[in-house]
Image (cartoon, rainbow, N blue to C red):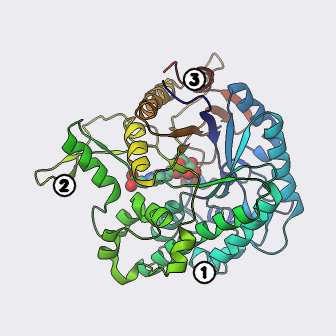
Amino acid sequence: MGFRKDFVWGSATASYQVEGAAYEDGKGLNIWDVFCQEPGKIYQGQNGDVSCDQYHLYKQDIADMKEMGQKAYRFSLSWARILPDGEGEPNAAGLAYYDALIDELLRQGIEPYVTLYHWDLPYALHQKGGWLNPDMPRIFEQYAALVSRHFSDRVKYFFTLNEPQCAAGLGYYTGDHAPGLKVGKRDFFAVWRNLLLAHGLGVKALRENAKQPIQVGAAPCSALYYPASDRPEDIEAARTAMFTLPSRDVNDFIWSIASWCDPVFFGRFPQDAVDYFGDCLPQLTKEEAAIIAQPLDFYGQNMYNAVMVRAGKDGKPERVERYDGFPKTAIQWPVTPECMYWAPKFLYERYQKPFLITENGMSSHDWVALDGKVHDSSRVDFMHRYLREYRRAAEDGVDLMGYLAWSSLDNFEWAYGYSERFGLIYVDYQTQKRTWKDSAYFYQETIRANGDNL
Ligand code: GBH
């Protein structure tokens, strides 16, 4: 047993994090271009103006993916590169860039997995209210239609929104991400609603304009949970924790997977969200619910770590505190390989779609050693442990479609700037030289063995 024969091994990036060329060839400004100029928002005032310059170096990056054996590359489109004002006239040079990228991927036998929106909203749309604007779902629909008309002759896999929870939660509620707003509860839920509708209309527009049968999904993130033991009551506690709200705090709503995925798959908010947030929570009409719950072809999820829970005295889920010195990555996230078994299992039970990990990986403080190599032994071990648990889920009957590593190469880590390196390939930002880390060789070997080496 193990992973299926046509398991998709690949890696992922996002436009603002890798492209650079922020002011080239007619690209419009986006909210990250602007946010990065605000003092105090980004580590050492850094920005994505140049980043790893994939805009110019894509052929080299694709050659690396090919050599590593990757079958798929998940990247996102810079909306403002394609539509400088977010709507209206497309920018021919922007479309041409993605044509070239896609054609090169196909030439190298790598399947393009295209994300429409990974947080870089055109600034012109922000000036019209951004995701608070009730016209946004329609505007996104137009953009999705254009993308489908233009690219779906060659692209078969699409994602609407990457981590809408972060776009809404970090962008509009905590203010840690662009556009850096801290709106009140009611406005926050309006953002949530607009994102849900944009997703649904986006799925529709992608399909209606497709030139061939396409597969559409999304790439949400969320808090994840795993049981403290194999006792049935602990497993049940973890399952309950996955799909219920621990409190009435809006932050708990943001990171609970059901807040996003229940509307998307079932057309309704979970009952506890309705109970806790009352009339602040958007009331969805029948028509709206149907738009949001467009059928999807697979279940994508970005996952990095999870919380351990056990059944408390009353049977309710109880968080188990991590022991002192618990393993963690450079960005301080815990190392919890168990999430790769339990989360796909729980999510597959509930949403019943082929499961795809759309992002997984870790940051470490890598550098080029005296021997010219990058010895990221912690990342090799991380991948080994995480993928072993993921394979266990496959062997337990979860329909696993594939695994996309975050990230193809080091890149701009949002508010952390260049201080966190998530790549399989090391980038020297002074020279743009790429160096394979030890984990890249490990991934190459793993792909070759289809995971039988784990
Ligand atoms: C992803 O974000 C992004 O898609 C990607 O662009 C980024 O570079 C990459 O990961 C690495 O950061 O357990 O309730 O606290 C991941 C961001 C961080 C998502 C925190 C949800 C909070 C859930 N995640 N997390 S909770």
Q: Amino acid at mark 1?
A: Asn
Residue that label 3 marks: 446
Indicate left or right for 198 with 61 as reference.
left
Q: Nearer the viewer, mark 1 or mark 2?
A: 2
- Mark 1 secondary-structure assignment: loop
- Category of crowding for the residue at label 2, using alpha-carbon neighbours closer than 10 angstroms: few (below 14), some (14–19), many (at least 20): some
Tally of numbered tags: 3
Closer to the camera, 283 or 395?
A: 395
The answer to which of marks 2 and 3 sits earlier in the sequence is 2
Residue that label 2 marks: 316
User: Which residue is located at x 34 percent, y 76 percent?
Assistant: 277
Residue 370 percent across, percent down from the top left: 62, 18
Residue 382 percent across, percent down from the top left: 46, 30
Q: Residue furthest top?
A: 371
On screen, 317 above or below 190? above
The answer to which of marks 3 and 1 sits earlier in the sequence is 1
